[in-house]
Image (cartoon, rainbow, N blue to C red):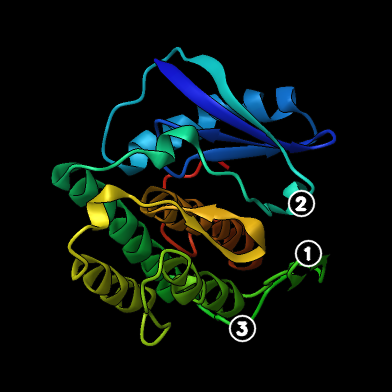
């Protein structure tokens, strides 16, 4: 199986995105370190979607972005070349369903954590402030990008209710627009470019970052069977 990879980096620190597996990614202190993690990431991603993962992978860098951001903490501003292309309704429906599945699954994991305000993870500061340590902090952080992401493509949204509810309302507001499938590229905050395709990818990507952190925290804090491994992480 061929994996088209987008490489975003700041010095040695690297994020590798799987362009053709929307939201899948790895991080590492170098490009090679991040690439070595990709087969395991894709296997877990395919299992999460209910498929069967192949034994062999071919990795190819199809795009590179030199960034001034703190990519070691998953700060990112890349837009894929493919995220400038329009969507068909069927493609949009498939990507929307995946973004909603991701929201449902992180909500399921969060709800299963025995004590949502307990954590064994030490405090650490990132580019956006203190790292979320508890399930409550991780969930709220993940949910509360909803209005930000939708606003970057001129869709009015909010963060009220569950992560599923606010994301569904955002998509409903988007779909009122008659030309949303054109996938217009918008000049967003801090000089970053955004499109609907990018928003869909960013939702799944951001969910995976914090779902993986929540799962690791829960296993370390409460034991290996404390929460269901709904994302099929190999950790």
Residue placed furthest toward the bottom: 160
Identify the element where label 2 is drawn.
loop
Residue placed furthest toward the left: 90
Q: Which of marks 2 and 1 is in front?
A: 2
**Which quarter of the rendering shows the C terminus?**
top right
Residue drawn at x 42%, y 56% as measured from the top left: 199
> How many C-alpha atoms fall within 10 Å of the one at disc 1: few (<14), some, or many (≥20)?
few
| Residue in front for this viewpoint, 118 or 157 | 157
> Residue 59, position in %: x, y?
53, 16
In the picture shown, does residue 161 fall above or below 5?
Answer: below
Residue 88: image quadrant is top left
Residue drawn at x 42%, y 45% as measured from the top left: 232
| Residue in front for this viewpoint, 38 or 187 | 187
Residue 53: image quadrant is top left
Sequence-earlier tag: 2 or 1: 2
Which residue is label 2 attached to? 69
Residue 35: image quadrant is top right
> Residue 129, position in %: x, y?
77, 73
Sequence-earlier tag: 3 or 2: 2
Which residue is label 1 attached to? 127
Which residue is label 3 attached to? 117
Identify the element where label 1 is drawn.
loop
Q: Are marks 2 and 1 in contact (CB under 8 Å)?
A: yes
Q: Are marks 3 and 1 in contact (CB under 8 Å)?
A: no
């Amino acid at each position: 199986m061929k994996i088209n990879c987008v490489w975003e980096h700041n010095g040695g620190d690297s994020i590798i995105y799987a362009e053709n597996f929307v939201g899948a990614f790895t991080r590492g202190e170098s490009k090679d370190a991040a690439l070595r993690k990709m087969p395991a990431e894709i296997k877990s991603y395919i299992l999460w979607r209910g498929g069967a993962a192949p034994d062999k992978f071919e990795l190819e860098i199809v795009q590179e972005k030199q960034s001034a951001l703190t990519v070691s903490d998953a700060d990112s501003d890349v837009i894929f070349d493919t995220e400038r292309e329009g969507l068909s309704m069927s493609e949009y429906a498939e990507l929307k369903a995946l973004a909603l599945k991701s929201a449902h699954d992180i909500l399921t994991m969060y709800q299963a954590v025995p004590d949502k305000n307990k954590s064994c993870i030490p405090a650490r500061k990132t580019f956006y402030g203190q790292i979320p340590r508890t399930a409550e902090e991780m969930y709220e952080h993940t949910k509360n990008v909803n209005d930000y992401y939708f606003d970057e493509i001129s869709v009015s949204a909010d963060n009220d209710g569950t992560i599923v509810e606010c994301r569904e309302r955002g998509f409903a507001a988007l779909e009122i627009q008659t030309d949303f499938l054109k996938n217009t590229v918008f000049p967003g905050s801090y000089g970053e470019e955004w499109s609907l395709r990018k928003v869909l990818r960013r939702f799944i990507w951001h969910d995976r970052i914090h779902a993986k952190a929540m799962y690791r925290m829960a296993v370390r804090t409460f034991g290996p069977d404390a929460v269901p491994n709904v994302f099929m992480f190999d950790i």
